[in-house]
Amino acid sequence: LPDQSFVTLATNDSYVKGALVLGSSLQQYRTTRKLTALITPQVSDLMRRVLEKVFDEVILVNVLDSGDSAHLALMKRPELGVTLTKLHCWELTQFSKCVFMDADTMVLSNIDELFEREELSAAPDPGWPDCFNSGVFVYRPSIETYSQLLQFATEKGSFDGADQGLLNTFFSSWATTDMSKHLPFIYNLSSTSVYSYLPAFKAFGANTKVVHFLGSTKPWNYTYDSRTKSIKGNMDDPKIVHPEFLNMWWDTYIADVLPLLEQHGIVKEITTGVNMLSGLVYTLAFSCGFCREAEVTEAVSHVSVSPLL
């Protein structure tokens, strides 16, 4: 529907990579809604052009920073202050209804049915279920609501210094009134909460529709082994994102996002560097007589990939 849209926000080039995976996953599961990306001036022109290949609209907005370092320090996440910039999504009045999704989410199936819900519909936060998690929510764009949110933020602030605290206080009836506005957890499954209630994940995890990569370490911060098609490093730490979801994110990144970056010359230099390194390995190996050709080929083919920028 032309008057409904999925909306996300990228405040820098790193989060653009997340937004590109999100947009690609929505396309993969054939959404019929528009895709809109809000970006701040910190996003480079080159990455903006890549976003325009995936999203129907890419809109530049200014940064709204709570400046609430005390509350953010409690969460040990000072970078969250700029997430108040998310409030700009209420200005998108060209749409009658939207679903906002953080750039560190990705869909695992079609979720267009969310547009049947009303404002403000969201899933419980795994850390405090009486609050909703603001990584995925259904809302109606409105300049009046936007103005009220800005005034509320100025006068009362946010109990966590970020958008989630502000939105939960503003939409405080969510916890106690209309249960139809409580989205099932499968629409915003915290990738780290898998370990906190493993039996539930084993019983219901297969129905997951949206995975949310909460925490300061994002999928693009890991290293992906292109040969084994898996994440490198220790994946047994309960604080680490479930590897199944990380691999899904990287599968989409490699298949859909990396080719776009290559088309825009963003990864050309790195690719050239890898090729030069490969040639150097061959030259050194044979000149020194260290190993056979097959062994060098094996070494060169085992190249790991990290997102660039």
Image (cartoon, rainbow, N blue to C red):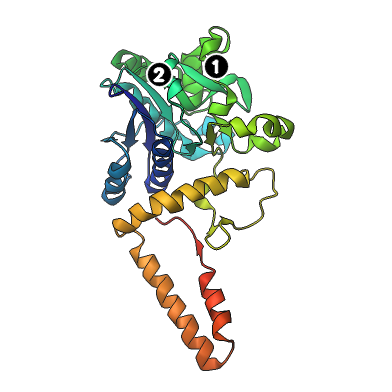
**Is residue 158 something that shows in the picture?**
no
Which of the numbered marks, if any, corresponds to residue 77? Answer: none
Left or right of residue 199: residue 115: left
Let me know if residue 289 appears in the view. yes
| Above/below status of 11 relative to 134 | below
Element type where label 2 sits in the image: strand
The amino acid type of the residue labelled 2 equals Tyr
At a point 51% along the width and 67% down the height, the residue shown is 303
Q: Amino acid at mark 1?
A: His
Q: Residue 232: where, in percent of width, then height?
A: 60, 58
Please tell me whether residue 299 is drawn above or below residue 45 in the rendered image.
Answer: below
Q: Quick one: label 2, few (<14), some, or many (20+) residues within 10 Å?
A: many
Give the spatial CA distance, label 2 vs label 1.
13 Å
The residue under the point 48% across, 58% down is: 306
| First along the sequence among labels 2 and 1 | 2
> Toward which corner of the image does residue 28 lie, by quadrant?
top left
Q: Which residue is mark 2?
A: 139
**Up-down relation of residue 135 to residue 249 (above or below):** above
- Residue in front for this viewpoint, 236 or 33: 33
**Helix, strand or loop under label 1:** loop
Q: Circle 1 sits on which residue?
A: 182
Instruction: Please identify the quadrant where the C terminus is shown.
Output: bottom left
**Where residue 51 sits in the image (x, y, percent)?**
31, 43
